[in-house]
Image (tube, rainbow, N blue to C red):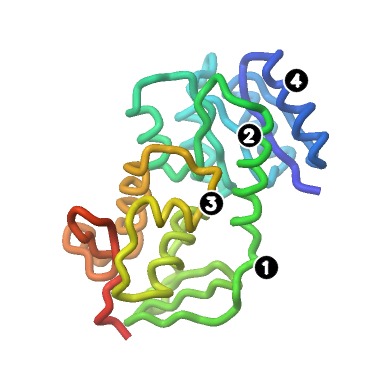
Amino acid sequence: MPTILVVDDEARLVKLVRAYLERAGYDVVAAYDGHEALVAFRRAVPDLVVLDLNLPGRDGLDVFRALRQESDVPVIMLTARVDESDRVVGLELGADDYVTKPFSPRELVARVGAVLRRAEHTSAPSGLIRRGDMVIDPGRRIARRGDKEIALTTTEFDLLHTLAQYPGQVFSRGQLLSQIQGDLYESDERTVNTHIKNLRRKIEPDPRHPRYVITVFGTGYKFAGGLS
């Protein structure tokens, strides 16, 4: 049974989210500030973290940075902030999804399930994809360039896998979001730009002049068709 760590300083909200998640079959661990969140994370080793950005004491983004230094656990951000930069920073750090307050607890449960399904190593097909000096192993959810394994978040791997399966095919931002998160994703399509930027930083020898993930201006992105 997956364990979900819910971090928010609003006790009433945590209680409500816990009830919905437990009803859906998850174990739930709660924390109410940044310091407590890190302690609870190290103790419980959860399968997913629901993390509020506006925490007392230690800011949620700071907590997220600390989590990323220790683990690639999937993270869904909660935010009541209207400033887009907060969400962009979280996505650049490797968040898998975000939900803006106020939100439907049922929607959050659905998003938790979607992110966990994407993170399951056994759910992907096992055939290796070879593109130039890059090898993508969907079954183990591992990407390598040469002899070096590339550390990717769930969303980054799904984007890479989707693009690399069809080299040369152009995907719009909406198509990519639909491929990796399905109908649950209602975010601004521009968020895919942030994920692509993160992906390029990890896989490209020179992210400023990408050779793998190519921008098709006015349309979206494609994986370089000339690689074999």
**Horizontal side of residue 220 vs 144, given as left or right:** left
Tag 3: Cα neighbours inside 10 Å, few (<14), some, or many (≥20)?
few
Q: Position of residue 178 (x, y in %)?
A: 47, 53
Q: Nearer the viewer, mark 4 or mark 2?
A: 2
Instruction: Report helix, strand or loop for mark 2.
Output: helix
Going 55% across and 25% down the picture, which residue do you hit? 52
Farthest-out residue, bottom: 228
Residue at which label 1 appears: 122
Give the residue displayed 46% in from the left and 37% down from the top: 65
- Label placed on residue 182: 3
Question: Marks 1 and 4, how far apart in space?
Answer: 32 Å
Please report contact status of discs 3 and 4: CB closer than 8 Å, yes or no: no
- With respect to residue 156, does 32 lie above or below? above
Q: Nearer the viewer, residue 30 or 159?
A: 159
Earlier along the polypeptide chain: callout 1 or callout 2?
2
Q: In the rendering, which numbered label is found on residue 15?
A: 4
Q: Which residue is mark 2?
A: 108
Q: CA distance from mark 1 to mark 3?
A: 19 Å
Nearer-N-terminus badge (3/4): 4
Separation of marks 3 and 2 at Cα, in angstroms: 14 Å
